[in-house]
Amino acid sequence: MKVAEILQPAVALMIWTMVMWLWMYATRIPAMNAVKLDPDSLARDPTRTLDDILPAQIQWKAHNYNHLHEAPTLFYAVALLLAVAGQGNGTSVIIAWAYVGLRVIHSLVQVTVNKVTVRFALFALSSIALMALIYHAARVVF
């Protein structure tokens, strides 16, 4: 059975999401220990968050990890739809890899220098790639 090539960038983005998960906890847990934070204290006071306690550079990783569960959910859905419809090769794969590459670069910018204008440009470009995939999927199913 030949696997649709579009599943490769989808799995690559899943792997990247787990890399960000590891990076988030590799920095967050030591930072929480450094400030002697009792995690249960956050549950007792819902107005207090880790954003209030930890340095911004530590939280950038957590924010990015959360971002990787927003728009990429549409990417996973459209990749699966195109794969099932037999349209997960060719131009769709090139666009999918562009999407993944832009999301990885977005992550690296957010977790290191966090320049919002650069992040926005990368997000906008990745969104255009995602829209192109969704357009292709719409043409396939309608």
Image: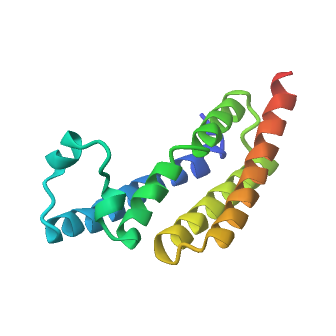
118 and 53: which is toward the camera: 53
Query: Extreme bottom residue here?
Result: 113
Q: Compared with residue 31, is residue 48 higher up or lower down, i.e. above or below? A: above
* Residue 6 coordinates in the image, percent (x, y): 66, 45
* Residue 127 coordinates in the image, percent (x, y): 73, 51
135 and 97: which is toward the camera: 135
Residue in the picture at 60% in, 59% down: 103
Q: Quadrant of residue 114?
A: bottom right
Residue in the picture at 87% in, 30% down: 139
Observer able to see residue 120: yes
Q: Quadrant of the C terminus?
A: top right
Q: Compared with residue 139, is residue 114 higher up or lower down, i.e. above or below? A: below
Residue in the picture at 53% in, 52% down: 13
Q: Compared with residue 108, is residue 5 higher up or lower down, i.e. above or below? A: above
Q: Quadrant of the N terminus?
A: top right
Residue in the picture at 15% in, 45% down: 40
Observer able to see residue 22: no
* Residue 11 coordinates in the image, percent (x, y): 52, 48
Q: Is residue 31 left or right of residue 75?
A: left
Query: Extreme top residue here?
Result: 142
Total labels: the figure holds 0
